[in-house]
Image (cartoon, rainbow, N blue to C red):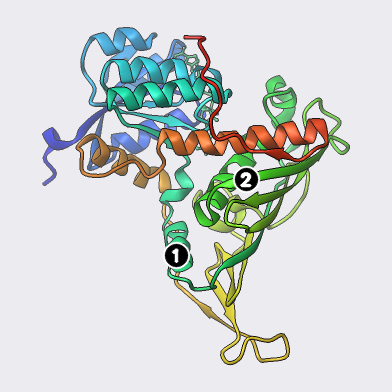
Amino acid sequence: MVDRQARKRLAVVGAGLIGTRHIDIIARSNDAQLAAVVDPVAAAAATAKSHGVPWFADLRTMLADDIADGVVVASPNQLHVEHGLQCVEAGLPVLIEKPIDSDARRARRLVDHAGALGVPVLVGHHRRHNPIVKAAKERLDAGAIGTIVAASGMCWLYKPDDYFNVEWRTKQGAGPVFINLIHDVDLLRYFCGEVQSVQAVQSNRTRGHEVEDTAAIILQFCSGTLATISVSDTIVSPWSWELTAGENAAYPNTQEACYLLGGSHGAMEIPSGRIWSNPGKRSWWEPIGHDDYDVTSDDPLDAQISHFCRVIAGQEKPLVSGEEGLRTLLVIEAIKQSAQEAVPITVSSTPERSSEF
Ligand SMILES: NC(=O)c1ccc[n+]([C@@H]2O[C@H](COP(=O)([O-])OP(=O)(O)OC[C@H]3O[C@@H](n4cnc5c(N)ncnc54)[C@H](O)[C@@H]3O)[C@@H](O)[C@H]2O)c1
């Protein structure tokens, strides 16, 4: 039997779309127990009641009660740093939903402050917890395709038209680069290393909203790897992580690949788990075949919560630290700037700190 006392007590801040998923996962976890729900709206009070835990309209009040070992922040992007700072100042490790914030300068302040206090910050780029990603990463690191020369990624989705009835989703600050592509950029950073520079173009031609519906991007990695990635929320297609990885039953699974990685000794399809190579001499005239490795998808949000508990217990280091979340955000900011100014942008490694807080 699982010792309930050993379970880490986690509070969830923001009980909206993703926050309620975290709440459900924590409630049935063997590693965690739900300590509190923090969200000013009445629906959140009802959620807390249904789980038999205290409800708070405000994070500071919850922190003063000393009832949690860690906090999951799933509030709107613009509040992430403010909430993160309150947690680390109270000495509580915090798992912040992606993006770490909507502003890299604010995020820098949080990462530095948490580092100085020695309190872990994790960012919810949950795909890295998927066994599919771990399997691909292990093989790439072991040289399964040699040196990665180029990569190609697709995030082509069709969001139903009524998705855009919510006004903020059509305005600056939203858009598929910030909402969706950030996950793909994070995974490509995981596979290929740091991004040195980006060139991007974007278009709102199909939907006509203020914000882009489609973007195409060239990434140059510090390693020399080149990548092309594109994102659209207005393409009917089987090629996106959502429809290929099978990690969320809400989406059909097309069993296709959405990333192709090309190396000096082979090529890899992800998430379908296929590695192509010449069995003999490397040459386009020689036979080429593939080995398929097993890919069992799992709910990475579950794995992320268990990992968070082990970080709180001091047993593991964050897989996606605040610094990692910040670096992914810096690439997204560079992509947006490149698209706006129609020039290549070098990705900043040290944004100034904001003095906003
Ligand atoms: N990892 C993923 O795949 C994934 C998926 C969806 C959303 N997200 C991220 O999660 C975050 C939340 O997104 P969502 O779609 O659940 O949004 P949402 O609007 O459904 O939920 C946000 C919740 O935060 C609450 N809130 C607002 N101000 C608050 C405050 N001061 N204190 C506490 N709670 C407050 C709101 O009342 C709301 O219930 C965003 O950062 C988003 O980018 C991540």
Q: Nearer the viewer, residue 199 or 205?
A: 199
Q: Secondary structure at mark 1?
A: helix
State left or right for residue 78 relative to residue 135: right
Residue drawn at x 82%, y 28% is 209
Q: Which residue, given by chain and number where applicable, does mark 1 sit on?
A: 141
Q: Position of residue 62 (x, y in %)?
A: 29, 12
Q: Position of residue 140 (x, y in %)?
A: 48, 66
Q: Position of residue 70 (x, y in %)?
A: 28, 27
The three-letter amino acid code for the residue at tag 2 is Gln
* Local crowd size for mark 1, using a 10 Å CA cut-off: few (<14), some (14–19), many (≥20): few
Question: In the picture shown, does residue 114 fall above or below 297?
Answer: above
Q: Position of residue 49 (x, y in %)?
A: 32, 18
The three-letter amino acid code for the residue at tag 1 is Asp
Question: In the picture shown, does residue 33 fall above or below 150?
Answer: above
Q: Nearer the viewer, residue 54 or 312?
A: 312
Any part of residue 290 in sight: yes
Residue drawn at x 29%, y 22% is 117
Question: In the picture shown, does residue 91 fall above or below 350?
Answer: above
Residue drawn at x 67%, y 57% is 226
Question: In the picture shown, does residue 9 fall above or below 331?
Answer: above
Of the image marks 2 and 1, the number of the one nearer the N terminus: 1
Q: Which mark is nearer the camera, 2 or 1?
A: 2
Q: Which residue, given by chain and number where applicable, does mark 2 sit on?
A: 196
